[in-house]
Amino acid sequence: MILRSKGYVILLAAVSVLLSVIYYQTLNQCDRSPASLSASGNEQVSEIQNAINKIYHQVDQTIPKTNFTDIMKSSSAKQSKVFVKYPKDSYCVGDQLVLQVDMFDHLGQRKTYGGDFLRARMSTRELDAAASGRIEDFKNGSYHVHFILFWEGTVDITVFMMHPSEGASALWIYRNKWHGYVDHVGKFETPQQSIETVCGFDLDRSKELCEYKDERDEEYFYCIKPENFSCNSLSTMKSWRRHDRTLFTDVEKGLFNESNVRVKIPKDFDQIRVTRCNTSVPHSYKTCKIGAKLEYPSGYVMRNVWYPKGCKTLAYNTLDSLSKCFTQKFIYIFGDSTVRLWMLYFQTNMKTLLPFNHYEDNWARQLLGLDVPKNLKITWKRHTFPFISGSYQSFKEERTIAREIDLIGGDKRTVIVLHIGMHFRAYPIYYFIRRLYNVRHAIERLLIRSPETKVIIKTENTSAMSANFETMSDYHALVHYFIMDIVFKDLDVGFVNGWDMTNAFDTNETHPPKIVTENEIKMLMTYIC
């Protein structure tokens, strides 16, 4: 027991030592075989666990299982090549362009398996235009890159090897192996005293634990129970990535050197010339609606404006000009700091939206904006753990997004925006799958009781890809994107495809520039209005 008035430094040291002991015990127990998600013995597997297992294995089947010992036998961007699969004398706006990528290792030997993390982009500098290319993996060292030629002009194409397949495989295996990439500390408080203790998703069961559980959704979180404190006295929580911890071998570390990340693959062609072959009046698209599937590419950018594929966005100059649309609206935003940017954008660009301060005193506190004359309410609330933040966050009102949705009655005036991803990259994938699975079922319940409620889901942004790849690589986001497509398929929701938009804008920042946020919000307002 530690009094507030003294011993705080000693306590921090003790917690740090305990976390280190747990880390090294876990590391010593860690083997390199793929993680098993099955129940042991005769234990009955729940519906949720069955769904997690099924999706896990869908992803796992796409990742090569290699016994990697020689970096010279890993994929080399410089040795590989890109060429046009079906070359033509001329290309028209709207045509499909297919490239082939053949991967070779550093010795010049043809790769015989897939799994390389590739990213493709086409652009026209004079028009400030760009779009993404969709990667198709044949699992034999060859790939197709599918582009839609959205505009007229001279197009440059770039294909990057973000990670070789051997690096992607290592990221997948080690992510699912343990919980050692993030440390959690909880603070228990009474009116007289407080104490910090180790918390997390997977703690030593031989110790007395406080269990914080949601039995319906099979969500669990634990803290080592401090002596003479009730489990109900857990008040705040903080967590941080341990970039000093790694499961990479020395050879594997070489896969993530700067010279081996986001490397251009040579191509045997120059620019592609695209003309507007059809002189008829351009097709008039309808406004984008809820219910369209998640597509990649989902559109293109030109002169800082996003043009979605097959539909059009709402035309407006300022958010204040959408007064009629905002009237009588209740907009709930759940997620991390990337959709917190949306909330900040609303607060900055709507003159009549007044902030209402909550009692928490940290950056991730709930945000609330009110416009009483319009009867408008917009809120942002962080998704619950895992939510990695070095500053203490209140534990008192923590709920998963699924539970938050269950508390919303919903109607034609209600809009729910949600996003999760970045904070899950440092944890085994089944936490992410479970969270999405439970969110889907919460949305289904919502749409049964209130089918007019609008739900919009944002995908992750691309990031800098400059360091800390074990926990921060965009490869984890690629896996998340694949899973999101599986889980939310055929659900009557709208998508704001941040994964596609940030690649087209070429921002490579978790928190992209204002112009990207502006275009993401324009997609959101198109769905709402």
Image (cartoon, helix red, strand yellow):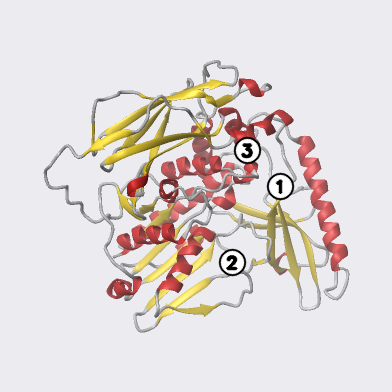
Which-is-in-front pick, marks 3 and 1?
3
Disc assigned to residue 335: none
* Residue at 25%, 34% in the rendered image: 95
Image coords of residue 408 (percent x, y): 43, 67
Which-is-in-front pick, marks 3 and 2?
3
Q: Nearer the viewer, residue 509 or 416?
A: 509
**Label 1 packing within 10 angstroms: few (<14), some (14-19), many (20+):** some
Where disc 3 sits, the SS reads helix
Q: Is residue 86 left or right of residue 119?
A: left
* Residue at 23%, 39% in the rendered image: 93
Q: Is residue 341 above or below residue 169?
A: below
Q: Which residue is mark 1?
A: 243
First reached walking from the N terminus: tag 1 or tag 2: 1
Q: Which residue is mark 2?
A: 364
Image marks 1 and 2: residues in contact by CB distance under 8 Å: no
* Residue at 77%, 38% in the rendered image: 27
- Residue type of the residue flagged with mark 2: Ala
Where disc 2 sits, the SS reads loop
Residue found at the far bottom of this picture:
373
**Label 2 packing within 10 angstroms: few (<14), some (14-19), many (20+):** many
Image coords of residue 225 (percent x, y): 77, 60
Q: Which residue is mark 3?
A: 258
Q: Is residue 293 above or below residue 396?
A: above
- Residue type of the residue flagged with mark 1: His
Q: Quadrant of residue 232?
A: bottom right
